[in-house]
Amino acid sequence: MKGVEYVPISHRVEGGVGTLAIDGVLQAEMEPYRSAAGNVTTLRESVFSTVPGSPAWVSKASKNKVELEQYGLSWEFEGRNAIQSDWKMEHFA
């Protein structure tokens, strides 16, 4: 472990189109693949789903940028495969 940062996380998925943002750290945008008929593709009831009980959208990440220069980590990719799901994180004090 290199460190712990406390920053807001923004995550949104609508119809398989998703964004994930952590201010000053991470930006990701994803668009689901579509079938020949134009339907959004998903994995359901599959061991390949990233979140059990939630459909996983098989996607293309149009943007994936990480900047953690204080730890020597920085990269940016476009057009790579991605899988995204609905998820919820809870914090209990």
Image (spheres, helix red, strand yellow):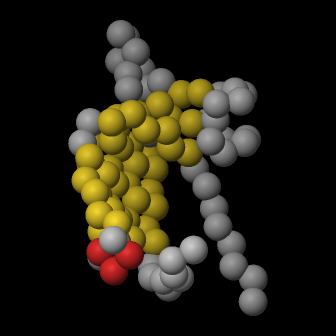
In x, y percent, where is residue 65? 29, 58
In x, y percent, where is residue 33? 38, 26
Residue at image position (43%, 38%) is 82
The extreme top residue here reads: 36
Residue at image position (44%, 57%) is 12
Residue at image position (51%, 81%) is 3
Q: Quadrant of residue 43?
A: top right
The extreme bottom residue here reads: 93
Vertical arrangement, residue 9 with respect to residue 65, above or below: below
Q: Quadrant of residue 24?
A: bottom left
Vertical arrangement, residue 87 with respect to residue 1, above or below: above
- Relative placement, left or right, of 64 versus 5 is left
Quadrant location, the C terminus: bottom right
In x, y percent, where is residue 23? 33, 76
Q: Is residue 23 visible?
A: no
In x, y percent, where is residue 87? 61, 55
Quadrant location, the N terminus: bottom right
Vertical arrangement, residue 35 with respect to residue 32, above or below: above
Q: Is residue 38 visible?
A: yes
**How many marks on residues?**
0
- Relative placement, left or right, of 85 versus 32 is right
- Relative placement, left or right, of 79 versus 22 is left
Vertical arrangement, residue 47 with respect to residue 26, above or below: above
Residue at image position (53%, 28%) is 42
